[in-house]
Image: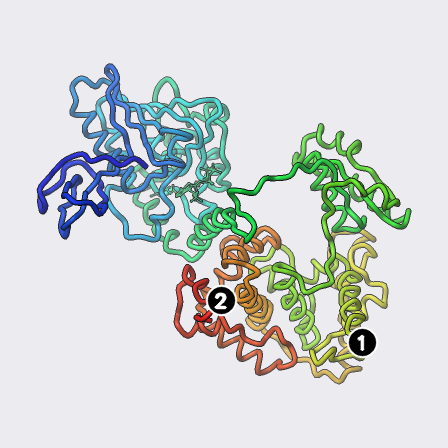
């Protein structure tokens, strides 16, 4: 951002040129279209975000709002003034719109969506550009996205560097292009291309875009009658839809997720931070365990071109793992997820071994299974998994829990996940905990160390129902290692037998109870994680869920979801479940949550209450 003192108007007079900010200095200057009011000791300094210069017979409007030249109010004002000025200037024969630094404008300023709207609007500026009697040319480099592409589509001509990318990523923010993009792109690029770009949000290289006619070096493409309504009506409808989406919870969550991803990158630790940390090169890695999870990690490492040792104690398991990896890599190549070259190279990068000595010089060994409570993801997901099993013990079926959670937005239900990772893994983790406590569990065990215990998973384990790998677990599969989960009446019998033996009266369980118990138990743990300083802000937890568990982006993450529901409501329901399930410590309400709920603290202020005296 560049600040300039542009004029020296009197206090109370009307400014001429644009947006202004005030900084505490001695004298009074003002610039802008607004009246300057309560200014005693301030400089009013114009924030020039569009540089206007004339070179020969060209007026150049260069957007200067780093880092991505977002179309903030100041930029819009600058573009508006610039196009008016260029239209008036007799020496100007053509106008060029471009971006300074890394990129052409990458869209509207998302931070302004939560603030009151300020004129001029983008379509208004666009229409001024379109009506300008002098040719207006968009000179595109970097990422020309969203509102930036809409501005370009209003220009009479578009020229671009080959490396430039254009796109409408609004869908990733739960929006649609709201400055005539839905009306103008189909007319320039055709309905099919427009539908694809708008609904996928994908960035298109300038070379591809040129084929579609979005970037046009020669002349404005003839406007195609590609939609059902005349332009004005189409524009009106687009504005209405955009407004509806902007006010929706979904868009708010997606905007939150966008910024959360960037916020967490600015991490701070007692011994360093994101600025001082230096990445260590990873030249070799090892994965111990050739099961489903281990093989999946090997595939990720190979796809990134990193050499990896795959370690197993048993030749049979090692060979099974190698087969699985080969088949996943081949599938990835077929689907175009990795290039054939990467696929071919993978075979040379993978080194199977049964000898620990081979691992002595590797740079990285990912830890697959932790027996402790876990730090963030495992710790929060513990209550989630436990509640799922309790719900089944009380009356739900695994398929019901999965269906409800998939409807909620998870890509795959918790019991399908358990079949994928292995019923034996969940069993062994529990047995490790029991061993540490010096307890021996049986199929009749209902409490462990004073806490509720459900032995249903143990039953499946003892029946050899280990999940996908054995062709049956909480579901049945077409074959061992199969992927198609089908409900299995044998599982219902096992559950009913379990309940009968233990004298548990089964009951109807509602979808609402399933969502609340699965989600609120892990949200409660999330607040305890904040209290304990394991995560330094709710965004850490949410991004971890978005990436680690494919939590639906349109809900933002579990902590944002809790905030949307209302902390008071979430807290009350947690207290209710705590009263009803006193032997499950994960229902003990978080102190932080109690405090935040009582004071209705906004999310961006939660952390002030997370530690120390306020808690
Ligand atoms: C009426 C309007 C209708 C219109 O149709 C609606 C829209 O245009 S909707 C918009 C449609 N457009 C989009 O959705 C594009 C969203 N942007 C992107 O996809 C990437 O930023 C981009 C690919 C451009 C650059 O990637 P990169 O090089 O890896 O850089 P980076 O990602 O690390 O970002 C650097 C910094 O810039 C910040 N910031 C970025 N964009 C915006 C923004 N629009 N606003 C505000 N801020 C934004 C970002 O937070 C970060 O800040 P910080 O404080 O340093 O953390």
Q: Ligand 1 is found in which quarter of the picture? A: top left
Local SS, label 2: loop
In the picture, measured across the screen, residue 348 lies left or right of residue 187, that is: right
| Residue for point 40% across, 36% down | 68
Q: Residue furthest top?
A: 56
Q: Which residue is mark 2?
A: 611
Q: CA distance from mark 1 to mark 2?
A: 35 Å
Q: Nearer the viewer, residue 469 or 545?
A: 545
Q: Which residue is mark 1?
A: 439
Residue 197 higher or lower than 549, as above or below: above
Q: Nearer the viewer, residue 302 or 471?
A: 302
Residue 204 higher or lower than 594, as above or below: above
Residue 511, position in %: x, y? 58, 70
| Residue for point 12% across, 37% down | 8
Using a 10 Å C-alpha cutoff, classify the residue at mark 1 as few (fewer than 14 neighbours), some (14 to 19) or many (20 or more).
Answer: few
Local SS, label 1: loop
Is residue 330 visible in the rendered image? The answer is no
Q: Nearer the viewer, residue 513 or 44?
A: 44
Is residue 40 visible in the rendered image? The answer is yes
Residue 107, position in %: x, y? 38, 39
Quick one: label 1 or label 2, which is nearer the N terminus?
1
């Amino acid at each position: 951002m560049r600040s300039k003192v542009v004029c020296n108007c009197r206090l109370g007079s009307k400014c001429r040129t644009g947006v202004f900010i005030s900084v505490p200095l001695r004298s009074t200057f003002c610039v802008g279209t607004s009246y300057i009011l309560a200014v005693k000791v301030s400089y009013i300094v114009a924030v020039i975000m569009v540089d206007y210069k004339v070179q020969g017979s060209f007026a150049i409007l260069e957007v200067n709002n780093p880092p991505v030249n977002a179309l903030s109010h100041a930029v819009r004002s600058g573009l508006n003034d610039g196009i008016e000025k260029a239209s008036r200037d007799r020496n100007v024969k053509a106008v060029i719109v471009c971006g300074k630094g890394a990129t052409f404008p990458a869209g509207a300023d998302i931070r302004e969506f939560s603030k009151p709207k300020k004129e001029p609007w983008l379509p208004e500026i666009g229409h001024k550009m379109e009506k300008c009697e002098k040719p207006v040319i968009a000179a595109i480099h970097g990422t020309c996205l969203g509102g930036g592409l809409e501005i370009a589509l209003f220009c009479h001509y578009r020229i671009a560097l080959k490396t430039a990318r254009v796109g409408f990523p609004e869908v990733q923010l739960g929006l649609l292009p709201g400055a005539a993009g839905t009306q103008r792109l189909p007319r320039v690029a055709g309905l099919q291309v427009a539908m694809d770009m708008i609904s996928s949000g994908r960035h298109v290289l300038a070379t591809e875009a040129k084929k579609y006619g979005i970037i046009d070096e020669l002349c404005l493409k003839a406007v195609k009658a590609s939609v059902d309504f005349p332009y004005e009506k189409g524009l009106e409808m687009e504005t209405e839809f955009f407004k509806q989406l902007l006010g929706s919870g979904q868009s708010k969550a997606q905007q939150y997720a966008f910024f959360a991803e960037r916020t967490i990158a600015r991490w701070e630790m007692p011994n360093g931070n994101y600025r001082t940390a230096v990445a260590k090169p990873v030249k070799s890695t090892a994965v111990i365990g050739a099961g489903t999870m281990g093989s999946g990690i090997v595939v990720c490492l190979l796809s990134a071109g990193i050499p990896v040792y795959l370690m197993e104690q048993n030749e049979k398991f090692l060979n099974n793992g190698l087969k699985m990896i080969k088949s996943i890599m081949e599938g990835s190549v077929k689907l175009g997820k990795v290039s054939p070259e990467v696929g071919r190279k993978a075979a040379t990068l993978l080194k199977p071994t049964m000898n620990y000595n081979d691992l002595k010089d590797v740079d990285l060994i990912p830890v697959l299974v932790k027996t402790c409570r876990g730090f963030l993801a495992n710790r929060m997901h513990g209550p989630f998994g436990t509640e799922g099993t309790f719900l089944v013990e009380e009356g739900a079926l695994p398929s019901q829990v999965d269906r409800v959670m998939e409807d909620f937005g998870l890509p795959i239900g918790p019991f399908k996940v358990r079949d994928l990772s292995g019923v034996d893994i969940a069993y062994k983790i529990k047995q490790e905990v029991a061993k540490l406590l010096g307890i021996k569990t049986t199929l009749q065990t209902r409490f462990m160390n004073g806490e509720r215990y459900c032995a249903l998973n143990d039953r499946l384990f003892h029946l050899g129902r280990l999940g996908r790998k054995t062709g049956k677990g909480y579901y049945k599969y077409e074959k061992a290692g199969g992927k198609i989960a089908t409900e299995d009446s044998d599982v219902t019998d096992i559950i009913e037998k379990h309940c009968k033996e233990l004298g548990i009266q089964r009951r109807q369980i509602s979808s609402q109870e399933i969502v609340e118990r699965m989600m609120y138990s892990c949200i409660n743990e999330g607040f305890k994680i904040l209290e304990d300083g394991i995560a330094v802000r709710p965004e850490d937890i949410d991004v971890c869920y978005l990436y680690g568990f494919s939590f639906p982006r349109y809900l933002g993450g579990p902590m944002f979801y809790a905030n949307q529901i209302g902390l008071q409501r979430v807290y009350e329901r947690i207290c209710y479940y705590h009263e009803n399930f006193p032997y499950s410590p994960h229902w003990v309400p978080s102190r932080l949550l109690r405090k935040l709920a009582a004071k209705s603290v906004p999310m961006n202020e939660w952390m002030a209450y997370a530690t120390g005296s306020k808690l």
